[in-house]
Amino acid sequence: MASITVMLSTLSAAVVIGWSAQHRPIQVLHLAGPGPRVLVVGCIHGNECEGMVVVNALLRTHPREDLWLLPDLNPDGYDIRRRLNANGVDLNRTFPNGRQPETRVAVALIRRIHPDVTIWFHQAENRVRAWGGSEAVARRYARLSGMRYASVNWPTGAATRWQNTALHEKAFVVELPAESLDPWQIQAQVRAVLGVATVG
Ligand SMILES: [Zn+2]
C-alpha cells in the first residue's frame, strides 16, 4: 500500500489503486490543480455507468480544481452490466466497513485525498440528489448542468452517507438519464463538475 500511496501523489496517468473481487484493476486519474479537491466516481452500480463518459470527457480538460477521477469502482458488475459486484453485493450499501474489496479501495482513497466535493454518478432518475450538508453544492450542480434537484436522505451504507455524516465532506449523487448522453449533455456535466466547487 505504501508504494501505491507514493504513486498517487506523483503521477497524473491512470494508477491502479486496487482490485475488484474478480481481480480487475480499479484505476484513478489525477488532474492536479490548485483549486478545491473534487472526486468524481463514474460508476458504482455496474448497470448505471454512463458517468464514465463524463469522466472520459473530463480527462481532456485543464481544471482549476484538483480533480480526481475514478472511472469505474465496480468493473466486475460493469462487465456483465449488473448493479452488484461479483459477490452479489450492492457496494453502495457497504460503506465504510463493508468487506468488499471495491469498498475498501474507495474508502482508502477517500481517507487519503479527503475531497472537498465528491460526485457519485448513477442512473437513471435524471436528477441530482443530496441531503444535509451537501444540499447547497448539489443544487449548484443541478443549476450548472440544467438538471432537476431533489433532497432525498441517504440509504444506510451509502458512500454519500458516510462521507457526509462521518467525514463531514460534501458528497452527492448525480442520477443521469437512462439513455446515452449526447455531446451537449456531456458538456453540461463537464461544466457542472468544473464549476461546482469554485463558482461563488
Ligand atoms: Zn445507483
Image (tube, rainbow, N blue to C red):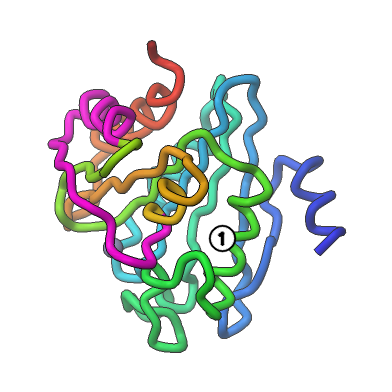
**Picture residue at 37% right of the left edge, 71% below the top:** 93
**How many tags in the picture?**
1
Helix, strand or loop at mark 1:
helix
The relative height of residue 172 versus residue 190 in the rendered view (above or below) is below
Q: Is residue 18 above or below residue 175?
A: below
In front: 180, or 147?
A: 147
| Residue 61 x %, y % | 52, 28
Q: Is residue 146 above or below residue 77?
A: above
Along the line of sight, the residue nearer the viewer: 2 or 94: 94
- Image quarter hosting the C terminus: top left
The residue drawn where x is 63% and y is 34% is 31
Residue 1 is situated, as x and y percent measured from the top left of the image, at 80, 64
Residue at position x 16%, y 37% from top? 149
Say which residue label 1 marks.
106
Q: Quadrant of residue 132?
A: top left
- The image quadrant where one finds ligand 1 is bottom left
- Looking at the rendered structure, the kind of residue marked 1 is Ala
Q: Which residues are magenta?
A: 135-159
Q: Is residue 15 left or right of residue 5?
A: left
Q: Residue drawn at (59%, 51%), measured in percent from left and top?
A: 110
123 w.r.t. 128: above or below: below
Farthest-out residue, top:
200
Dividing the picture into quarters, in which one does residue 134 lie? top left
In this view, the residue farthest toward the front is 166
Residue 109's spot in the image, x, y percent? 63, 54
Residue that sits furthest to the bottom in the current view: 87
Q: Residue 79: within the magenta?
A: no
Residue 34 in picture, x, y percent from top left: 64, 20
Asked if residue 158 is among those painted magenta in the image, a careful observer would answer yes
